[in-house]
Amino acid sequence: MRHPKIIISGIALAAVAAIGGITAASAGGSPASTTHSARPGTVATVRTEHATIGGKSETILVNAGGLPLYFYRPDTAAKSFVTGGLARLWPPLTSAAPTAAGVNGKVTVVTDAHGHQVAYNGHLLYTFTSDHAGQVTGQGFQNFFVATPGLAPVTASSAPGGTVPAAPSANGYGY
């Protein structure tokens, strides 16, 4: 006899994955980098979409379900500082073999406490539980910022928290 809690948990996980809250990880090793275009007939793990942020239309990165993607300023290219309750509010984007569409930056996988976490130009990526597809509500909240295709790469000399230029760019968000 199957346990109802296991069945309900499985159904809930499938529902979350279906709406884009989780990108399912496939078995296998984690590649150092990925192809920058999605396979025909598949939805890219990371893609671009237009959204309104601070009253302005911006091109942002979204997951396969259209949820906005964010980076956490204190993270480094190799380590996520998003844990516990913070990780429940800001789930990491995970995939063993992510694909990308509409971006020129580098999509990689970092194997960490979250599993195979997806990074863009060295910035680990997250969604926000209060967002819906096409809606950005987490900009600047708790040190999370919307990821854009022009997000500057993290360099070896970048210190934690130094991933965003100090001077704001023309779009006012510092990236």
Image (spheres, grey):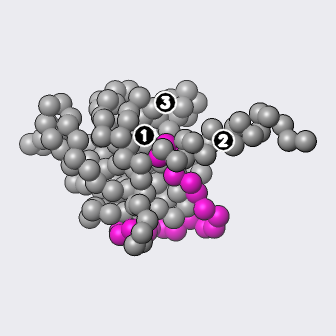
User: Going from the N terminus, do you reach mark 3 or mark 2 first?
Assistant: 2
Visible residue check, residue 163? no
Whole-angstrom CA distance, mark 3 to mark 1, is: 8 Å
Whether pointer 2 and pointer 1 mark residues with C-beta atoms closer than 8 Å, the reply is: no
In the rendered view, tell whether residue 124 sits above or below residue 4. Answer: below
Q: Residue at x 60, y 62 (%)?
A: 26
Q: Nearer the viewer, residue 9 or 152?
A: 9
Side of 18 where 33 appears, left or right: left
Q: Position of residue 132 (x, y in %)?
A: 38, 35
Q: Position of residue 90 (x, y in %)?
A: 46, 35
Type of amino acid at the residue the image marks with label 2: Ile
In the rendered view, tell whether residue 56 sits above or below residue 147. Answer: above
Residue that badge 1 annotates: 127
Q: Position of residue 66 (x, y in %)?
A: 36, 47
- Predominant secondary structure, magenta span: loop
Q: Nearer the viewer, residue 43 or 114?
A: 43
Type of amino acid at the residue the image marks with label 1: Thr
State the residue lying farthest toward the left. Answer: 170
User: Going from the N terminus, do you reach mark 2 or mark 1 first?
Assistant: 2
* Start-end of magenta stretch: 20-38
Residue that badge 3 annotates: 89
Q: Residue at x 69, y 37 (%)?
A: 9
Q: Nearer the viewer, residue 15 or 96?
A: 15
Residue that badge 2 annotates: 11
Whole-angstrom CA distance, mark 2 to mark 1, is: 21 Å
Q: Which is closer to the viewer, label 3 or label 2?
A: 2
Category of crowding for the residue at label 1, using alpha-carbon neighbours closer than 10 angstroms: few (below 14), some (14–19), many (at least 20): many
